[in-house]
Structures are given as C-alpha cells and as structure tokens.
C-alpha cells in the first residue's frame, strides 16, 4: 500500500452515459497544498466530490491513510469540505457554526466552545464568536467556513472553488491567508479552481485536468516552465504555439520545420514526428537580438496596459494563423498597427510532443 496520505487508484465515473472521469490515478502527500485546475467539465469537481464521499466512483478505489474509503459516507471519512457558498447556518452564532461538526460528534458544550474559539483565532476572527453570519463580510464568512472545517481536525481539507465569490482584491488577500493557515496547521489541502493565477499562488502540487483526465501534475513552477502537454501549456498560463514537423534528429538535438522557419533545440522526437513549440509571453523578444531564434515579423493587433507590463497581441506577417502573445515593459513604445521583429532564446522554447 502507498505511503501517501491519499491514493486515488484508477478512478472512472459516469453520470448516465456521460463519462466525466477516465482512469484517474493521483497521490496526495501529507502536508501538501494540491490544486485541481481545469476548465468547466474537466472533472475536477467530480473528483473532489469522490474524495469527500459525496459521489461513489463507477470504477476504481480511494484510499485515505491507507484505508479503503471508496464507499465510506462523508461523515465517516477523515475529510471535510469547504463549499463556495460557505453553507453557514444564518440563525446560529459564528461560534455555534464553527462548533457544529463537534456537536455532531458528541463533544460537550464547554469543550466545543473552547475549540471553536481556538479555530476562530487561527483564522483571525476571535472577536466574531458571538456574531451572526450576516454581520460579517464575504471574506470573514469564508474564514468562518474554513474554521468550521478545520476544528474537527480532518486528515484532508477539501475546498470547492472557495474564493470564486470574492472580488479580486479580497480573493488575493484570502489566497495569502489560506496558504499561511495551511502551513500553520499542516493539514493537506485539496483545492478546486479554474483560476491559473490562484493555482500558482497557492499550490505546491498542481494537477491540470482536461476532459476527465490528468494532463499534467507537479510543482507549479515545473508545470508552468516545462508543461507536459499542449493543453497544459495553454491553460496553465498563456503561450504562443508553433506547429511543426521534426526534419532532423541528431545527438539529442532536433530541427523542427515551422512557419517561422527551421528551429533547432534539445529533444528526442524522431524525424517526421508532428510536434508543437510553446513560448511563454515573457520569453518573446520584440525586436531581433543577437544569438536569438528569429521568428519573423509580426503586426501588432492590440496593446493592453496591465500595470507592471503591457500585453502585446500580434499576428505573424509570414503566417497570419500564427498569433504571438508577448509581455513588454510598461514603458515600451508599442502601438497597434506597428510591424515588429519577433525572436526568442532557443532555451526558452518548450518542445511538446502530444
């Protein structure tokens, strides 16, 4: 048996004739912050529901702490879930809400209140014990829901898009607080989101899902810098994608024929293989530079000011189907309609074989 805290083994699931998970296997380590990232319909919420016991998979097993929990109901497994809508009881005080799970476990009132106060202090809401949920802001209610989940000391805390209802500033604040709380308590968090920035801000283990499968997983730095698949390269951050064919492979280096010309870079695909080359926006250079790979000329279609940088969208002059996405300094004098040379360093090009 695996030493992992959570071991999801060959899990598939169907709703009627619709297959929503396809042979998914995943391991979660103790103390980790795992993000399940993917678009709507990718299967991430269904996988979280299976982990929480709200759905029994059509096939496969779920082990938690080495025990088969596949058919164990939510109240009997060592997990608890924080939902996007918080699900607080409006007629109860904040303290009673936080202590509700302990009440269901038969914990006496005095100990329940003491542990609820400890949990509220952990999330920075010690003074809210006697308030009602309607007296709190959205961010405060989110923290109450988190305290209620943590007070029963689960082995795994499941979070279903918990920040989706918050405005941008509050969402970023809560990201910082969630990460800090997770580090303090040491509980494994598994968090569902479709927000790539949220994933990179929180995760130490990022799982990219698409069409019921896991496309990529690992530390967010690796998933971003060296994505395993074309989907991962375009969902976990933006990329310019060049399609090509390997024309030569020699001594660990391949030459790929693309619409921007032949490009040589490290790799192992054999001649004739269809590949894709991904380039992150920050690695595209507007203007030719010595030693860089020339990607031709591009006509600027749009320039979006985003504070610390400008996001440049441009179309290749040589191949109008090739669209460049670049980041330029905020001070860059680039305007829509400009025609510019585009290049990048060979070491920054990501070779994708899927």
Image (spheres, rainbow, N blue to C red):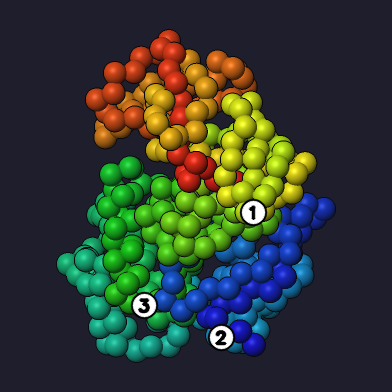
User: Can residue 308 be seen here?
Assistant: yes
Relative to residue 38, is residue 291 drawn left or right? Answer: left
Of the numbered discs 1 and 2, the one sitting upstream in the chain is: 2
For mark 1, what is the residue? 251
Position in image of residue 156 (x %, y %): 48, 75
**Between tags 1 and 3, which lies in front?**
1
Q: Is residue 340 above or below residue 265?
A: above
User: Farthest top residue?
Assistant: 337
Hey, which quadrant is residue 75 in on the image?
A: bottom right
For mark 3, what is the residue? 186
Position in image of residue 102 (x %, y %): 40, 81
Q: Is residue 203 above or below residue 285?
A: below
Q: Is residue 194 above or below residue 28?
A: above
User: Can residue 160 be seen here?
Assistant: no
Viewer-nearest residue: 283 or 109:
283
Which structural element holds mark 2?
Answer: loop
**Between tags 3 and 2, which lies in front?**
2
Hey, which quadrant is residue 145 in on the image?
A: bottom left
Relative to residue 64, is residue 348 drawn left or right? Answer: left
Which structural element holds mark 3?
Answer: loop
Q: CA distance from mark 3 to mark 2?
A: 17 Å
Hey, which quadrant is residue 168 in on the image?
A: top left
For mark 2, what is the residue? 3
Q: Residues within 10 Å of mark 3 (few under 14, many from 20)?
A: some
Which structural element holds mark 1?
Answer: loop
């Amino acid at each position: 048996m695996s030493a992992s805290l959570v071991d999801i083994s060959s899990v598939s699931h169907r709703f009627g004739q619709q297959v929503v998970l396809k042979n998914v296997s995943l391991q979660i380590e103790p103390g980790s912050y795992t993000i399940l990232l993917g678009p709507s319909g990718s299967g991430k919420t269904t996988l979280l529901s299976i982990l929480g016991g709200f759905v029994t998979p059509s096939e496969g097993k779920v082990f938690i702490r080495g025990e088969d929990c596949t058919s164990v109901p939510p109240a009997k497994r060592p997990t608890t879930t924080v939902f996007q809508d918080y699900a607080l009881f409006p007629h109860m005080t904040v303290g009673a809400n936080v202590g509700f799970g302990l009440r269901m476990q038969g914990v006496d009132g005095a100990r329940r209140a003491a542990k609820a106060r400890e949990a509220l202090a952990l999330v920075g809401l010690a003074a809210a014990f006697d308030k009602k949920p309607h007296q709190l802001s959205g961010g405060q209610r989110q923290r109450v829901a988190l305290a209620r989940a943590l007070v029963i000391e689960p082995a795994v805390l499941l979070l279903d898009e918990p920040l989706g209802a918050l405005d941008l500033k509050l969402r970023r604040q809560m990201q910082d607080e969630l990460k800090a709380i997770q580090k303090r308590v040491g509980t494994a968090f598994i968090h569902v989101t479709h927000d790539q920035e949220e994933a990179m801000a929180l995760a130490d283990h990022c799982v990219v899902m698409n069409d019921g499968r896991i496309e990529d997983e690992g530390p967010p730095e690796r998933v971003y810098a060296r994505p395993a698949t074309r989907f991962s390269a375009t969902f976990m951050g933006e990329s310019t994608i060049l399609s090509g064919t390997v024309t030569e492979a020699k001594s660990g280096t391949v030459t790929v024929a693309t619409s921007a010309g032949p490009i040589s870079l490290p790799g192992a695909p054999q001649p004739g293989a269809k590949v894709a080359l991904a380039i992150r926006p920050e690695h595209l250079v507007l203007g030719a530079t010595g030693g860089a790979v020339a990607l031709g000329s591009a006509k600027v279609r749009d320039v979006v000011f985003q504070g610390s940088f400008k996001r440049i969208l441009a179309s290749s002059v040589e191949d109008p189907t090739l669209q460049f996405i670049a980041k330029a300094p905020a001070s860059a004098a680039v305007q829509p309609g400009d025609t510019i040379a585009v290049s990048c360093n060979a070491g920054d090009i990501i070779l994708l074989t899927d």
